[in-house]
Amino acid sequence: MKTNETWSPYIRHQGPPSPGMKAPQPVDRRERVLLVGVSLRQGRLTERGSIVSRDSLDELEELAESAGANVVGHVLQVRDAPDPATLVGRGKLEEIRGEAQALDAPLVIVDHDLTPVQLRNLEKGIGRRVIDRTQLILDIFATHARSREGQLQVELAQLNYLLPRLAGRGEALSRLGGGIGTRGPGEQKLETDRRRIREQVRKIQDAIERVRTQRTTRRRARQAVPLGMVALVGYTNAGKSTLFNALTGASVLTSSKMFATLDPTIRGIELPSRRRVLLSDTVGFLRALPPGLVAAFRATLEEVQEASLILQVTDISNPHHAEQDQEVVKVLRELGVEDRPRIQVLNKIDLLKPEEARQLGNHRSHDRVFTSAATGAGLDQLLAEIDSALPIDPLVRLRLRMPIGDGRHMSIVNARGRVLHSELEDGHLLVDAELPQSAARSLQEFVRD
């Protein structure tokens, strides 16, 4: 007798379920995690303090899910000041331990940058593996890095993060105190590991420098032709890659997961004036982005520094878009491009309610464009605004008098510019045209006042 077997990615069972018996449910194989946040009553700390609120904890959940986690619980504590030893204090530590055991969560993610001492004490007190916000972001970066450059930058950031924390990673490396059984080999092993990591960091830095040199060479080759560079920047998951695909016809990965796009991509687009520009899609920014990550990805962010025009993409449907924009401006300030010509692209208008969309329509301006990359709404206006704001290779109007048989120069006019008016005169063609300045130089012999 044959047996019907049904396979799924999670379970295997034989035959249909018996009457009155519930069908087997798929088993979630994702790692179960508990999220922990700390919020301070007395306002903000320093920029590195990572003040955690409920909104920040929700963002941490998105990050965890992007890393493939199954978030099973949240713990948010309000304190006057962070505890230097455990961040949360001994009382809260017991509560987190009990919550992790009750939820069967082998991993605890803390929405804060932990010191080596705090990390060691939390793992010891909770009895679970603990990582902080930076480790989580690095894990996502490592998953999404595709190019050699991106992988090198992720590895460099991971090693720089690990180096000061070696003493807290496991008993074999932490027995450095005084007393019997704590001297000798442990310290030698720790110093050996540190030396190896430092050597690896130097090798990676040299490799990144070679990649940076190659990128500079390619950039100079592009600059030999006067093409403007336009960079897309914005908070992670603002829709930059979808907008990039809509403008260029490319097929860059788009995903609702945070940091889905890590490696920069450059494509050419044609503006309404027939000018061609290069559009660059870059890594998304994030609230309290660790400075080490910004430093590690400086080679990638050089495309932003070289851009003639910046498109700051905002998810207008997100209720916290104003705070996200402030974080983007903060990173632009660190890169030294805060004063670069910029157009704010308010994206995802298709997700707004009709009355919200109408209210936004009353606040249009030349440096604010409302778009929906998913539906294509507003893209023509965006291209027109880029055309108007781009400072590279400006448009000039010329009156040309060309022989009728000179097809080569006439093809330049048609390919690189727009013909506004034309007429015949004594075997010549009088043309009023609008062209980029670079193309106008090759037509100077035909220019008439």
Image: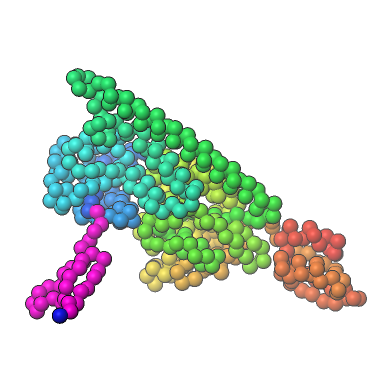
Q: Nearer the viewer, residue 72 or 19?
A: 19
From where the camera sits, is residue 192 visible? yes
* Magenta stretch, main secondary structure class: loop
Residue at image position (37%, 30%) is 194
The picture quadrant where one finds residue 10 is bottom left
Q: Tell me: 338 left or right of 199.
A: right
Question: On screen, 244 above or below 301?
Answer: below
- Position of residue 184 measured from the top left corner of the image (x, y, whole percent): 27, 21
From where the camera sits, is residue 232 visible? no
- Residue farthest toward the top in the current orientation of the protein: 179
- Residue farthest toward the front in the current orientation of the protein: 1
Query: Any magenta on residue 20?
Result: yes
- Position of residue 24 measured from the top left corner of the image (x, y, whole percent): 16, 69
Q: Tell me: 287 left or right of 33.
A: right
The N terminus sits in image quarter: bottom left
- Position of residue 289 measured from the top left corner of the image (x, y, whole percent): 40, 45
**Bounds of the magenta span?**
2-31
